[in-house]
Image (cartoon, grey):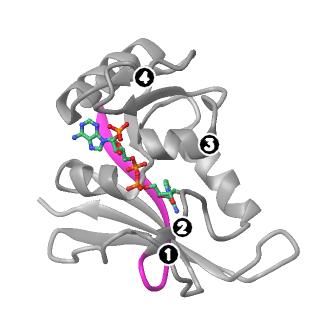
Amino acid sequence: MAISLILVVAAAENGVIGRDNRLLWRLRTDLKRFRELTLGKPMIMGRKTYESIGKPLPGRETIVLTRDGGFSPPGVHVVHSWNEAVAKGEGLAQAMGADAVAVVGGAEIYRIALPHVRKIYLTEVAVAPEGDAFFPPVDLTRFRELARVAHSESPDDEYPFTFIDFERRY
Ligand SMILES: NC(=O)c1ccc[n+]([C@@H]2O[C@H](COP(=O)([O-])OP(=O)(O)OC[C@H]3O[C@@H](n4cnc5c(N)ncnc54)[C@H](OP(=O)(O)O)[C@@H]3O)[C@@H](O)[C@H]2O)c1
């Protein structure tokens, strides 16, 4: 089975994805989508994002990128380069019977992954907060939009947001 790389991100209108190593919104519907998109798959994340989550998420395998040779929290796969992360992700996906490896941030890891991912699952949050971590605008010469679903703000979701799926143009 061919294994593809997908990227899952929630970004504000101004590209902000976080501040002080935390998220800036409470969107239960988006957390649910994140869970659905990543469940049963290996996930690649940066050390800072891992620390902001604080533990491996159940039902997935967590691959953490760090340059720190001494970093070894229990229950995660620690890697030290992008190529090692992808190789580990593909191996785990095969073992799990998954068709994709999900790249889940943060900003540094998205930057490295973007030239390589086949799909982007963007949640565009209708807010423009101050932040210190950013996702770039999706380059429409490289990706085309596949689907778009708008959601209103609700008791579960602090702001309106839109799920937008992109696929790489070949
Ligand atoms: N809104 C969203 O969808 C979303 C998703 C995820 C994260 N976030 C937010 O994004 C922010 C974190 O992003 P960030 O850019 O600061 O950090 P990050 O991408 O999560 O992690 C950066 C770390 O990854 C390691 N790393 C990066 N490139 C590497 C390489 N080539 N080889 C080996 N290790 C490498 C380094 O770890 P060491 O320093 O240990 O060497 C680096 O400090 C937080 O605010 C978080 O809440 C938002």
Residue located 59% across and 46% down the image: 52
Quarter of the image for residue 161 reads: bottom right
Q: Which residue is mark 3?
A: 53
Kindly give the residue lying farthest to the top in the view shown: 95
The local secondary structure at tag 2 comes to loop
- Mark 3 sits near ligand 1, with its Cβ under 8 Å away: no
Residue position for label 2:
19
**Crowdedness of circle 4 by 10 Å Cα count: few (<14), some, many (20+)?**
few
The residue most toward the right is 155
Instruction: Residue at 60%, 28% (x, y): give it.
Output: 56
Residue topped by disc 4: 71
Q: Amino acid at mark 4?
A: Phe
Is the Cβ of the residue at disc 1 closer than 8 Å to that at disc 2?
yes
The quadrant holding residue 145 is bottom left
Closer to viewer: mark 3 or mark 4: 4
Residue at 55% across, 40% down: 51
Compare marks 3 and 4 and give the one earlier in the sequence. Answer: 3
Q: Does mark 1's beta carbon lie closer than 8 Å to ligand 1?
A: yes
- Secondary structure beneath dot 1 equals loop
Dominant SS type (magenta) = strand
Position of 157 with respect to 132 (left or right) is: right
Q: Does the closest atom of ligand 1 sit within 8 Å of the Cβ of label 2?
A: yes
Q: Which mark is residue 131?
A: 1
In the rendered structure, which segment of residues is drawn in magenta? Answer: 2-15
| Disc 2 to disc 4, C-alpha distance | 23 Å
> Of discs 2 and 3, which sits in the foreground?
2
Where, quadrant-wise, is the N terminus in this rendering? top left
| Marked residue nearer the N-terminal end (1 or 4) | 4
